[in-house]
Amino acid sequence: MRFRPLKSKVLVLMAVILVSGIVTLGLIPNTSCACGHYEDGTLLTHQINIVWKSLTGKRFFPPPPDAPK
């Protein structure tokens, strides 16, 4: 019974770390350069597109309409 408060604190800490990781990925822009590439959203949308494209063959988030082909 002594470990119940410790277990709940560890679960809360794990949840905070998970949520902060997702928020961090959502705020960092995806790598773009000055060589004509467009910015493909955030790292979170980029990772979602990679996984979705490997599963279905299509992007989950479409590219912007002004993106170069």
Image (cartoon, rainbow, N blue to C red):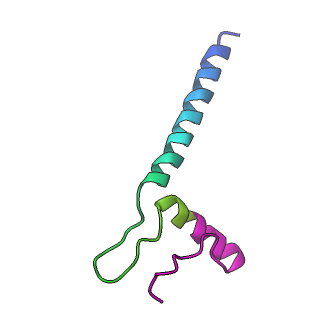
Q: How many labels does the image show?
A: 0
Asked if the magenta segment contains residue 49, the reply would be yes
Seen at 47% across and 61% down, the residue is 43
- In the displayed structure, 45 sits above or below 15; it is below
Task: Tell which residue pokes out farthest to the top in this image.
Answer: 2
- The spot of residue 49 in percent (x, y) is 59, 69
Location of residue 66 in the rendering, given as x and y in whole percent from the top left corner:
46, 81
Observer able to see residue 37: yes
* Quadrant into which the N terminus falls: top right
- Indicate whether 58 appears above or below 28: below
Q: Which of 44 and 63 is in front in this view?
A: 63
Placement of 35 over or under 44, stated as above or below: below
Q: What stretch is highlighted in magenta?
A: 48-69
User: In this rendering, does residue 3 appear at all?
Assistant: no
Q: Which residue is drawn at 60% across and 70% down?
A: 61
Picture coordinates of residue 67 (x, y %)? 46, 82
Q: Which residue is at a point 62% across and 29% down the rendered structure image?
A: 11
Q: Is residue 41 above or below residue 69?
A: above
Q: In which quarter of the image is residue 19?
A: top right
Taking the image as shown, residue 36 lies to the left or right of residue 12, namely left
Residue 17 magenta-drawn?
no
